[in-house]
Image (cartoon, helix red, strand yellow):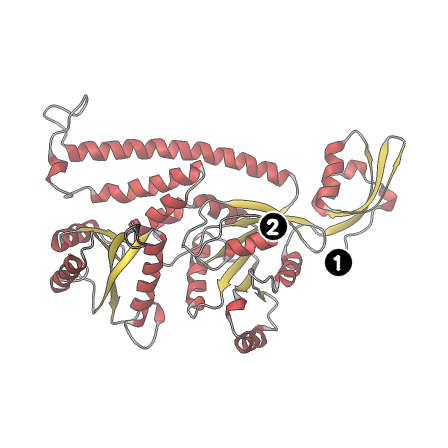
Amino acid sequence: MKTAQSVDNRESVLLVGVSLKKAPRGRAGDPSAAGRDSLEELRELAESAGAKIASSILQVRDTLDPATLVGRGKLDEIRAEAELRHVPLVIVDHNLTPVQLRNMEKGIGTRVIDRTQLILDIFAMHARTREGQLQVELAQLNYLLPRLTGRGEELSRLGGGIGTRGPGEQKLETDRRRIRDRVSKIKDAIETVRRQRTTRRRARQAVPLGMIALVGYTNAGKSTLFNALTHADVLTSSKMFATLDPTVRAVRLPSRRRALLSDTVGFLRDLPPDLIAAFRATLEEVQEAALIVQVSDISNPHHAEQDADVLKVLTDLGVQDRPRLQVFNKTDRLSAEELAALTKANGRNEDKIFTSAVTGAGLEDLLARVDAALPVDPLVHVDLRIPLSDGRNLSLVHATGRVLHSEVSDGHMHLEAELPESLVRRLEEFAQPAARKTPQSR
């Protein structure tokens, strides 16, 4: 009979973190506090990738070593720990330069990956759509290209096969050329998929529904909140980056308006540009959104710093001035006293809502705030006379508004309804001028 230990096929890893004595990001107090927090985040990332954490090492330095990141002495300590724990992989909580990566692998004597490569591996696990897979592969190839140099003598042998023989090309150059060719093909394929997605987005925009984007730090509970609001079944997981591909669902607001809600990938601190490009599909939904709902894990003691990182990404996307609501999620993890104190401190701020996607607390308030803040399509009270044969427009009226009264006469449907103003403009030819009323105030 196999034991739990014998069937544990997870790869054992050693985590290495580096913190500067001059605390980054304005953190006061213990200079190693930021490093411990960052190393804990790396632990969550590694476990999300399927790793088993054998041990971890945190170093506090004055400056980063340009050759090895950690210095020669610490490199020997890491090597001894890796040999003691019999780990085949060391994960460094830093974005390594090609030189640092090469020197660390040589000094430790085992495989080394950095934070960026770990996140790319998680992305590759969770990409489900064709575009998501292409974007991840593109990011991985762009990451690999500058790191081919010096990876070993095997990369300097003459290549075999048509087009690689003769006095010219070494295997290193062949690998580079193949990667560049693959990158070019992926970019063409991504552009094709993007055009297809743009066509679908325009089709959605033909039906006048406002777009709302859920954003937030990874593991803030966005997908659980998305499911609670839309009654969808999007994957929810405590693992980081469980949601990578964009998901859009309709949600009905208290005013009876319908809107589109988009679930996006979780953000993370210090994301390199290649990683941001790797989930551009979801970020484009953020750029198209009329309202941004920023979700925070209120139970996390560092949620304020995480919110600052999210705002930095929104600024990079140029949407920092877009109408935005702040949702403090996971209130079920707080004590009654903590929740009361936070609610009292933020009670007068209409842009801050406290919710629990698990228990449903605060969701009605959230929908009401979204309804009030969505800066598009105020409701208009209108009388319409639409031919019974025009099923498309009749369906639009029932799907996007509230029908107050209807009756059939002379092959037409007479409707008294409250509809979004943009839809009323599209149905102007069916409106009864004498009965047309002014937009309602909400």
How many angstroms separate mark 1 from mark 2 (CA)?
Answer: 29 Å
Q: Residue 61: where, in percent of width, then height?
A: 20, 68
Task: Please tell me how crowded label 2 is: few (under 14), some (14-19), or many (20+) other residues with Cα within 10 Å.
Answer: few
- Residue 107 drawn above or below residue 365: above
Q: Element under label 2?
A: loop
Residue at image location 66% in from the left, 60% down from the top: 368
Give the amino acid at mark 2: His
Q: Element under label 1?
A: loop
Determine the image quadrant of residue 424. Answer: top right
Residue at image location 58% in from the left, 77% down from the top: 344
Residue hosting label 1: 441
Task: Please tell me how crowded label 1 is: few (under 14), some (14-19), or many (20+) other residues with Cα within 10 Å.
Answer: few
Labels in figure, total: 2
Residue at image location 76% in from the left, 37% down from the top: 394
Of residues 206 and 358, the one drawn nearer to the viewer in this rendering: 358
Left or right of 128, for residue 51 = left
Q: Residue 359: where, in percent of width, then height?
A: 58, 63
Q: Residue 64: where, in percent of width, then height?
A: 20, 63
- Residue 349 drawn above or below residue 382: below
Label disc, if present, on residue 294 of the rendered structure: none
Give the amino acid at mark 1: Ser
Residue 102 visible in the shown view: yes
Residue hosting label 2: 231
